[in-house]
Amino acid sequence: MKTTDRKAALAAYKKRKVAAGIYALHFDGTDQKWVGYTPDLSKLQNRFRFTLGLGSHPSRDLQAAWNNRGASDLIFEELEQFDADEAPAGAALQARLAQWRGELNALPA
């Protein structure tokens, strides 16, 4: 790839629209759920499959469920989507996460 092509590709990547959001994870056939926030919903599944597959996910409960159930049973749900520049932050974000966790009886992801 030429340098100009690489620079153009990088510029296009930086200008792409990114959707932030609140998501839920659960394993098929179980009631246990995890809720979290990500600044880029399009990257969420790859990130979780990578960290869980390596056994290095920070949530021990989620990692244990992955180890018992496996990748094929993991289900991702998009609960809310925000424009990246309009996403809630700080206390507002924590309130939204707490609301979803309470509603779904979920753990932090």
Image (cartoon, rainbow, N blue to C red):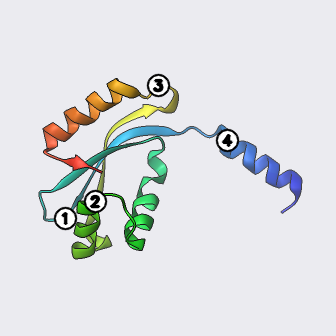
Q: At label 2, which amino acid type do we have?
A: Ile
User: What residue is shown with label 4?
Assistant: 14
Residue 40 appears in the rendering: yes
Residue 35 in the image, given as x and y percentages of width and height: 27, 46
Above or below residue 8? Residue 93 is above
Mark 4 and mark 1: Cα distance apart in space: 35 Å
At mark 1, the secondary structure is: loop
Sequence order check, earlier mark of 2 and 4: 4
Residue 88 appears in the rendering: no
Q: At label 4, which amino acid type do we have?
A: Lys
Mark 1 and mark 3: Cα distance apart in space: 32 Å
Residue 33 in the image, given as x and y percentages of width and height: 19, 53
Compared across the picture, whether 101 is left or right of 71 comes to left
Sequence order check, earlier mark of 2 and 3: 2
Residue at 80% in and 54% down: 6
At mark 3, the secondary structure is: helix
Residue 25 in the image, given as x and y percentages of width and height: 27, 54
Sequence order check, earlier mark of 4 and 3: 4
User: What residue is shown with label 3?
Assistant: 86
Residue at 22% in and 73% down: 69
User: What residue is shown with label 2?
Assistant: 75
Residue at 45% in and 59% down: 47
Disc 2 vs disc 3: Cβ atoms closer than 8 Å? no
Above or below residue 109? Residue 71 is below
Q: At label 3, which amino acid type do we have?
A: Glu
At mark 2, the secondary structure is: strand
Disc 2 vs disc 1: Cβ atoms closer than 8 Å? yes
User: What residue is shown with label 1?
Assistant: 28
At mark 4, the secondary structure is: helix
Compared across the picture, whether 55 is left or right of 106 comes to right
Sequence order check, earlier mark of 4 and 1: 4
Residue at 13% in and 65% down: 29
